[in-house]
Amino acid sequence: MVTAAGRKATLLVMAALTVVLTACSSGTTTSAPPSSTTAATAVASPATAATTITAKSFNYGAPITVAPGATVTFVNTDDARHNVTADDKSFASPTVTGGTTTFTAPTTPGTYTFHCTFHPTMRGTLIVK
């Protein structure tokens, strides 16, 4: 025989479960708004906007400008192997054939000319500021 106290306890447990399950399945989420630090880092400055050098048809394209020490992505769309090697040897990317790799830009601001060690007529410019 179920007592009144037992029924009351069962109803309380069922009510608590209903509240928990409803909250878990509402499909809405809340999160704190982004802090000003997060928002500031999401917006690229002109100095860091283009961080990709692309080799296409044996050409590097227009000069790019990056921040000191930035990670630069090198994309080789050609079937031939290419790399990005600074004329002054201050940086070099790994060699890739039809792929992507990264390297670190110099930490000293300046204009750096670079070439492909396999195709010396392929030349480009990296501006660090």
Image (cartoon, rainbow, N blue to C red):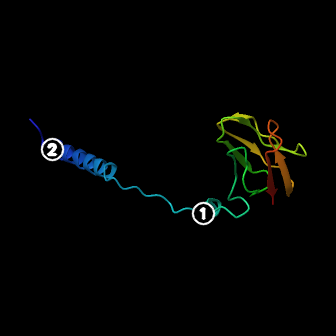
Amino acid, disc 2: Arg
Q: Quadrant of the C terminus?
A: bottom right
Reading the image, the residue beneath label 1 is 39
- The spot of residue 119 in percent (x, y) is 80, 39
Q: Residue furthest left?
A: 1
User: Who comes first in sequence, dot 1 or dot 2?
Assistant: 2
The image quadrant that residue 44 belongs to is bottom right
- The spot of residue 4 in percent (x, y) is 13, 45
Instruction: Examine the rendering and report whether any part of residue 109 can be seen.
Output: no
Q: Judge from the rendering whether residue 55 lies leftward or rightward of residue 109; answer left or right.
A: left
Nearer to us: label 1 or label 2:
1
Q: Which mark is residue 109?
A: none
Amino acid, disc 1: Ala
The image quadrant that residue 42 belongs to is bottom right
Q: Judge from the rendering whether residue 70 lies leftward or rightward of residue 109; answer left or right.
A: left
Q: Residue at x 32, y 52 (%)?
A: 23
Query: Which secondary structure, mark 2?
Result: helix
Q: Nearer the viewer, residue 80 or 40?
A: 80
Reading the image, the residue beneath label 2 is 7
- The spot of residue 68 in percent (x, y) is 80, 54
Q: Residue at x 36, y 56 (%)?
A: 28
Check disc 2: other Cα within 10 Å, few if <14, some if 14-19, many if 20+: few
Residues at badges 1 and 2 in contact (C-beta under 8 Å)?
A: no
Relative vertical location of residue 28 with respect to residue 85 in this rendering, above or below: below
Check disc 1: other Cα within 10 Å, few if <14, some if 14-19, many if 20+: few
Query: Which secondary structure, mark 1?
Result: helix
- The spot of residue 63 in percent (x, y) is 76, 56
Q: Quadrant of the N terminus?
A: top left
Q: Residue at x 33, y 48 (%)?
A: 24
Relative vertical location of residue 123 with respect to residue 94 in this rendering, above or below: below
In three-dimensional space, the C-alpha distance between marks 1 and 2, rounded to whole angstroms, equals 53 Å
Instruction: Examine the rendering and report whether any part of residue 60 can be seen.
Output: yes
